[in-house]
Image (cartoon, helix red, strand yellow):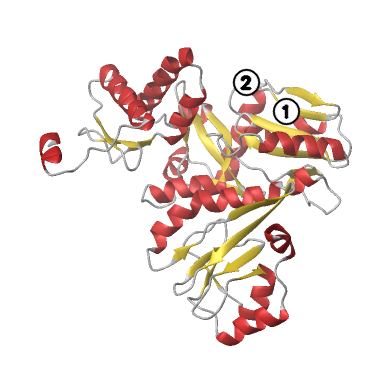
């Protein structure tokens, strides 16, 4: 086939670092497990389990590869071994009965990221009853903590356990509390980061007493930046809020275990989204557009696949101006647009009409209400028609100003 490709002018695709990583994993799995056969899907960057005992299982490689790239050269062999152990463990029958209950622990995951992964796998969301939204951007879930892997509990697994979600979660949190290792490192006066060392730092957000004992000004405010890093300060500590926001943004987009950027506040024993106000540090206020852009762009391909090519799924664009951030999206001309809930809409040129940039609120006043995209639950999107009417465009052009942030940015 390579000869025919050269003969007829076709070029073999150049091997990428991703392909070399996949080949290493593939060879290591086949060497360790004679009964597991895998095939590499280059386009999906995944390993498909193709031996007779497999049931359509796939292993996605993006997170493992990202972590591999961050490691020093002498640490990479162990990482490959860990991936191989994970694959081997995933093929074993899941623990059942009392064994499974004894291994139960809570986990906190990015809501958008998990929904996108499940959608791209082509199946239904397997955790509808075995998860619960937490402070809007996250999911609280259950896991069976085996020696080589963390196995998320599906709806079917929950039925097998014979418990409702609330009872199972209570048991899982109790197990985590019994484990101990609840520890913090200090970033600055009144500012802390978890140092639990067991990859369950984010889960400890479900143990409020762990946070109320911290010497912070006001209520505890936390950012669940990653599975192994929760940043904490006080609601009345301006310097602390700026510090945790700055730490949260560092490498967030490249962190393969990222969870959320939206800060949450512990009030009367309950976590709730922290209300960010104009007087708060700019670094903290920048977290909102960063969280929006990350969640929308993480789910964009999944939504596009679900809706098909007749609808344009708009990206959430991040714009920076002198250290201030805002979000925008394009309303395409001539095709319905699935639009993220951003600060401003860039309304594309259409025939004799010029491009406009208007706040989403103003577009809603003139052109709304819009239907919601119900096929994908989070983050929310509106379905905009292929075109606004000439009257609506004239109204927006003549009676509503360009969004102030983007006008200043363009200038």
Quarter of the figure with residue 61: top left
Q: Position of residue 348 (x, y in %)?
A: 54, 70
Give the residue at the far top of this rendering.
Answer: 74
In which quadrant of the rendered image does the N terminus lie? Answer: top left
Taking the spot 70% from the left edge, 39% from the top edge, the residue there is: 223
* Side (left or right) of 97 relative to 11: right
Q: Nearer the viewer, residue 360 or 169?
A: 360
Q: CA distance from mark 1 to mark 2?
A: 12 Å
Q: Position of residue 83 (x, y in %)?
A: 40, 24
Taking the spot 37% from the left edge, 64% from the top edge, the residue there is: 309
Res 21 visible: yes
Vertical comparison of 220 with 308: above or below: above
Quarter of the figure with residue 138: top right
Crowdedness of circle 1 by 10 Å Cα count: few (<14), some, many (20+)?
many
In which quadrant of the rendered image does the C terminus lie? Answer: bottom right
Looking at the rendered structure, which numbered label has been put on residue 197? 2
Res 207 visible: no
- Residue at image mark 1: 193
* Side (left or right) of 340 relative to 6: right
Q: Nearer the viewer, residue 227 or 332?
A: 332
Vertical comparison of 103 with 205: above or below: above
* Side (left or right) of 282 relative to 95: right
Q: Secondary structure at mark 1?
A: strand
Q: Secondary structure at mark 2?
A: loop
Vertical comparison of 347 with 148: above or below: below
Give the residue at the far bottom of this rendering.
Answer: 391
Q: Position of residue 108 (x, y in %)?
A: 59, 38
């Amino acid at each position: 086939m390579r000869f025919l490709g050269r003969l007829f002018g076709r070029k073999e695709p150049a091997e990428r670092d991703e392909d070399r990583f996949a080949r290493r994993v593939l060879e290591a799995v086949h060497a360790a497990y004679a009964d597991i056969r895998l095939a590499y899907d280059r386009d999906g960057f995944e390993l498909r389990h193709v031996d007779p005992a497999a049931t359509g299982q796939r292993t996605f490689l993006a997170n493992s590869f990202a972590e591999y790239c961050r490691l020093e050269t002498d640490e990479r062999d162990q990482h490959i071994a860990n991936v191989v152990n994970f694959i081997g463990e995933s093929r074993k029958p899941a623990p059942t009965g009392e064994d499974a209950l004894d291994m139960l622990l809570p986990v906190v995951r990015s809501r958008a990221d998990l929904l996108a992964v499940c959608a791209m796998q082509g199946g239904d969301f397997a955790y509808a009853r075995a998860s619960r939204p937490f402070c809007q951007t996250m999911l609280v879930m259950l896991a069976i903590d085996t020696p080589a892997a963390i196995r998320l509990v599906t709806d079917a697994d929950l039925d097998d356990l014979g418990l409702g979600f609330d009872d199972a979660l209570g048991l899982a949190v109790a197990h985590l509390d019994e484990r101990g290792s609840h520890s913090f490192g200090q970033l600055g006066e009144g500012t802390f980061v978890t140092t639990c060392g067991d990859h369950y730092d984010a889960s400890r957000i479900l143990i409020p007493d762990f946070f109320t004992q911290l010497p912070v000004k006001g209520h505890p405010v936390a950012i669940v930046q990653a599975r192994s890093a929760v940043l904490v300060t006080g609601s009345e500590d301006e310097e602390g809020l700026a510090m945790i926001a700055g730490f949260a943004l560092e490498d967030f987009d490249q962190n393969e275990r990222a969870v959320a950027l939206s800060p949450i506040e512990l009030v009367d024993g309950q976590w709730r989204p922290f209300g960010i106000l104009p007087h708060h540090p700019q670094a903290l206020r920048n977290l909102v557009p960063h969280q929006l852009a990350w969640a929308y762009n993480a789910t964009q391909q999944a939504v596009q696949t679900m809706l098909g090519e007749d609808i344009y799924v708009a990206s959430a664009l991040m714009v920076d101006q002198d250290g201030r951030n805002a979000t925008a999206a394009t309303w395409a001309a001539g095709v319905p647009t699935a639009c993220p809930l951003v600060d401003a809409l860039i309304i594309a040129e259409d025939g004799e009409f010029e491009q406009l940039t208007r706040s989403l609120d103003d577009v809603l006043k003139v052109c709304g209400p819009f239907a919601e995209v119900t096929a994908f639950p989070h983050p929310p999107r509106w379905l905009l028609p292929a075109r606004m009417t000439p009257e609506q465009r004239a109204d927006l052009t003549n009676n509503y100003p360009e969004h102030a942030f983007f006008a200043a940015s363009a200038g």
